[in-house]
Image (cartoon, helix red, strand yellow):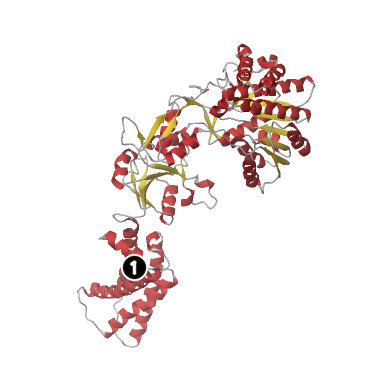
Amino acid sequence: MINLLRSTIETLPRFWKRVILVAFDALALIVAIWASYALRYAVWMPVITEERVVLSLIAPVIAIPIFIRLGLYRAVIRYLPDTAIWTILRAMGIATMIWIIVVFLMEMSGRGVVPRSVPFFYFAIGTALIGGSRFAAKVVLSHGTGMRRDEQPVFIYGASTSSVQLATALRGAGNRFVVGLIDEDSDHHGRDVGGYRVYNPANLPRLIEQYGVQEIILSLSSISADRRQSVIGSISGLGVKIRTVPDISDLVDGRYLANQIREIEIDELLGRSFVPPDPKLLGGILEDRVIMVTGAGGSIGSELCRLIVQWKPKRLVLFEANEFALYKIDRELQGARCEIVPVLGSITHEARVREAIRGQGVQVVYHAAAHKHVPLVEANALEGIENNIFGTMTVAKVAFEENVSDFVLISSDKAVRPTNVMGATKRWAELIVRQMALEAQRLGRSQHFCAVRFGNVLGSNGSVVPLFKQQIAQGGPVTVTNPEMRRYFMSIQEAAELIVQSSALSNGGDIFLLEMGEPVRIGDLAENMIRLAGFTVRDAENPTGGIEIQVTGSRPGEKMFEELFYDMANALQTQHPKILRADSTAIAHHNIVDACKDLRDAVSAADEQAARNVLFGFIGMGSQAEQGET
């Protein structure tokens, strides 16, 4: 019955809703006058006189214009704030005072006497009827025993002022229906906060089933990162979507907005501690300098560009071989506070690289251009060698000859004792950069060549995270090569910040290692992403689950466990707690120049097997010496 009434009211045009509200108020005020006389004389049917009929009819004539003036008919009843009671009290107070003046004038004309208690009864009863009817309608429309068919029941995790503000914002936007609040404080359990019942999180499984909740929104900006991670972990397996909102202090207008609700990102479950970037390191290497980023349209390269333009460089050169990727990042950075110069070209094209560096007066190079997808590079070894090794040699050589002051190679954890072509080419690239640093030191130049080595970046091109997201959105299955594989992960923003700060710490010839935390089991990563999306994992223990995880088998060149980036006994601390410096003195004796000639001959002859032999053989020859470094 209530659902039918609510549905009927909601489908009425706004005009007719106001007409019904005005008619109800007029009738309620007439009833209030009758009830006032009944209470005064303690009888159900007080004597009806001409004066009393006139006063009853005059009451709504006086009050309705006042109600209109004070906005009682502008408010949407469904979203009526609790503070509206003060407007109702004010409106009834003014209407009662004017009604008393009319009564006084009638008494002066000899039209009868109104008992002094009647106006007080009229004010109290009128306020109760006008205000009570509106808040009763609000309960029926907003809370009631059910909700609109198009509404989605949700819980808000947290019972703070921010949570109530969020719940209030959700009333007027979208189709979310806030069932209640969840809070761990036992003092709040069973109580109402801002008109919403607070529940114990231990009862969440039963509450989700009882109310058909499909989503839980976290409003936990005041708790620690560890506690937040624990909360997310405790509710991620309940078969509901988990979303969050930004810290209220981050919002310009100081209020939660419904459109700022976002999905929980997988990096929030990695448990990585956050260290704010050092402004002195960033500003010292970036401000008022001409900087070039190779691979500027890639995931790491583009994030580096976004960071660089925030620090007011003199000029940023975007060097990219992919036309569309270059167009995208160039368009995104338009309006930056520095000059943006897009350059379309390959890092293997020496003349094009020299033209960009010399023509723009480049002072700093971040070399992010590379083929990074392990299976693809494994299947196209010669191209991987050409791009990752000889491309790096070309850019480093030109940078050296054009007296670029800082050169930074973006390397990979797969360069540590590599088992695949991609990792091996990255190791060669590190050795090439080290050789350039030694040459600069020999000639007494103040040029700094260094490499920054780190693991997987969440959301980067080729990362498993975007692939898992796509597969989950399609309803599964989620494919993993081996669930027992373990990988290191960090956010792309953190990686960019640490890369730039590492370059500011370089003395020349350094290999910097970014602290990556604990490795993540790929099977756990897939399960967590499925649960964060609001699904359950379908397996032998839960055959009716939502999304299945399929094991496809390891691909060529893949390791089960990515090794740590360094031997802790030989890792040197820097002034930044997330950046370590490898002891790379052992690799000074690698004859990289002669090795590159042999590798070039094999590639020129299109002899992949010979190229592989040189590629891995050279690294194997120096493997014992490298034990002192990694």
Q: Is residue 263 above or below residue 429?
A: below
View extreme (right): residue: 443
Crowding at mark 1 (Cα within 10 Å: few <14, some 14-19, many 20+): many
Q: Amino acid at mark 1?
A: Ile
Residue 92: tell me if it is visible. Answer: no
- In terms of secondary structure, where does tag 1 sit? helix
Q: Quadrant of the C terminus?
A: top right
Nearer to me, 539 or 128? 539
The residue depicted at 51 percent of the width and 31 percent of the height is 272
Nearer to me, 504 or 22? 504
Q: Is residue 518 above or below residue 345?
A: above
Nearer to me, 69 or 310? 310
The residue depicted at 29 percent of the width and 63 percent of the height is 5
- Residue 593, given in percent of the width and then of the height, sits at 72, 18
The residue depicted at 53 percent of the width and 53 percent of the height is 253
- Residue 435, given in percent of the width and then of the height, sits at 71, 20
| Residue beneath disc 1 | 130
Residue 185, quarter of the rendered image:
top left
Residue 624, quarter of the rendered image:
top right
Nearer to me, 452 or 233? 452
Residue 577, quarter of the rendered image:
top right
- Residue 184, given in percent of the width and then of the height, sits at 37, 39
Residue 109: tell me if it is visible. Answer: yes
- Residue 551, given in percent of the width and then of the height, sits at 41, 28
View extreme (bottom): residue: 109
Q: Quadrant of the N terminus?
A: bottom left
Q: Is residue 11 above or below residue 340?
A: below
The residue depicted at 71 percent of the width and 16 percent of the height is 594
